[in-house]
């Protein structure tokens, strides 16, 4: 069985890492390079950077960040936000990113998924899906969670796979930043229906939440921000706890840091 991945996510605004709740109420969480070094030392499997301002004016900052990360990190990293063309993908990858994440542009121009996969390889194309529950189904949102699309999340996930994406980053807008657990139902539905990896995102607050997303939710990886940025857990602590519960994860030869009491307690409210 392939090892499950633990992935810190860094939302970038004007060169700083920020974090909110359900995409609102952003607060500063630190310097992206400093946090990246920390997660590199903690044996994160990958990192995801999302430029949430995603304006043309900020693209230079994003490219500069990608180049600096490529010089300092020894783990794969993904960059997303405002990527809307093959030229954008080319610039980000050339700057040093291993993967790109596309969301709004993928919905507006699905051919970008196909063309990106053909030109750069499926392994390079991650399609991010921001979804919100609506009755008995989940709707896809774009523009940083501000615009409903009318697209059914499960149907869109199937199309994303058909078009050649290598991975799906699935974020529950309802659970984002709440620290009350991942949306296991939509995660399981999409993970079970696809053969490409699904990264569960939104809601991770305790070790149980990570465990449930990877087992009940059948996700291939879990992405989290708040619990890592503000020190509730280290990545190493999460991995050690999952390993002890029988989840296959990549462990480094070094002895994992002992679990703090926080690892067994409910996440702070």
Image (cartoon, helix red, strand yellow):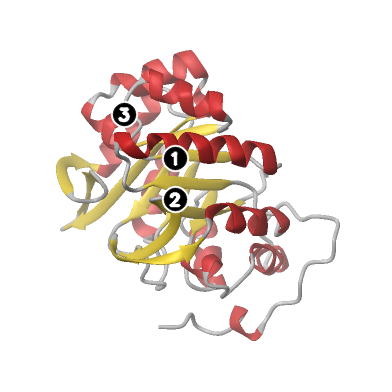
* Label placed on residue 61: 1
At a point 58% along the width and 73% down the height, the residue shown is 231
Mark 1 is surrounded, within 10 Å at the Cα level, by few (under 14), some (14 to 19) or many (20 or more) other residues, namely: some
Numbered disc 3: secondary structure: helix
Give percent across and percent down for residue 57: 32, 37
At a point 36% along the width and 52% down the height, the residue shown is 171
Compared to 94, does 260 lie above or below? below
Give percent across and percent down for residue 150: 14, 41
Nearest the viewer among 108 and 137 is 108
Q: Which of marks 3 and 2 is nearer the N terminus?
A: 2
Q: Are marks 3 and 2 in contact (CB under 8 Å)?
A: no
Give percent across and percent down for residue 63: 48, 34
Mark 3 is surrounded, within 10 Å at the Cα level, by few (under 14), some (14 to 19) or many (20 or more) other residues, namely: some
Compared to 3, does 125 lie above or below? above
Q: In which quarter of the image is the C terminus?
A: bottom left
* Direction from residue 72 to residue 131 in the image, left or right: left
Q: Quadrant of the N terminus?
A: top right
Mark 2 is surrounded, within 10 Å at the Cα level, by few (under 14), some (14 to 19) or many (20 or more) other residues, namely: some
Q: Mark 2 points at which residue?
A: 15
* Direction from residue 27 to residue 96 in the image, left or right: right
* Direction from residue 164 to residue 76 in the image, left or right: right
> How many numbered markers are drawn?
3
Q: Name the residue under label 3.
A: 159
Q: Which of marks 2 and 1 is nearer the N terminus?
A: 2
Q: Do the residues labelled 2 and 1 touch (CB within 8 Å)?
A: yes
Residue mark closest to the camera, 1 vs 3:
1
* Direction from residue 218 to residue 149 in the image, left or right: left
The CA span between labels 3 and 2 is 33 Å
The CA span between labels 1 and 3 is 32 Å
Nearest the viewer among 71 and 211 is 71
Q: Which of marks 1 and 3 is nearer the N terminus?
A: 1
């Amino acid at each position: 069985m392939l090892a499950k991945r633990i992935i810190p996510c860094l939302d970038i605004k004007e060169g700083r890492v920020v974090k909110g709740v359900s995409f609102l109420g952003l607060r500063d969480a630190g310097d992206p390079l400093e946090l990246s070094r920390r997660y590199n030392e903690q044996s994160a499997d990958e990192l995801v950077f999302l430029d949430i301002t995603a304006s043309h004016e900020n693209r230079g900052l994003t490219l500069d960040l990608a180049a600096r990360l490529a010089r300092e990190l020894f783990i794969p990293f993904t960059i997303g936000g405002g990527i809307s063309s093959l030229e954008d993908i080319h610039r980000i990858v050339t700057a040093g990113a291993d993967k790109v994440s596309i969301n709004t542009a993928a919905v507006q121009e699905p051919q970008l998924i196909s063309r990106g996969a053909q030109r750069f390889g499926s392994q390079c194309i991650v399609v991010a899906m921001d979804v919100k529950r609506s009755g008995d189904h989940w709707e896809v949102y774009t523009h940083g969670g501000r615009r409903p699309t009318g697209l059914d999340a499960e149907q869109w996930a199937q199309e994303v796979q058909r078009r050649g994406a290598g991975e799906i980053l699935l974020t529950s807008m309802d659970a984002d930043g709440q620290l009350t657990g991942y949306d296991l139902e939509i995660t399981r539905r999409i993970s079970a229906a696809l053969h490409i990896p699904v990264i569960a995102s939104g809601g991770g607050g305790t070790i149980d939440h990570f465990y449930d997303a990877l087992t009940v939710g059948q996700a291939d990886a879990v992405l989290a921000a708040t619990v890592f940025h503000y020190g509730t857990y280290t990545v190493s602590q999460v991995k050690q706890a999952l390993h002890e519960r029988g989840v296959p994860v990549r462990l480094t030869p070094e002895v994992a840091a002992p679990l703090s009491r926080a690892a067994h307690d409910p996440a702070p409210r």
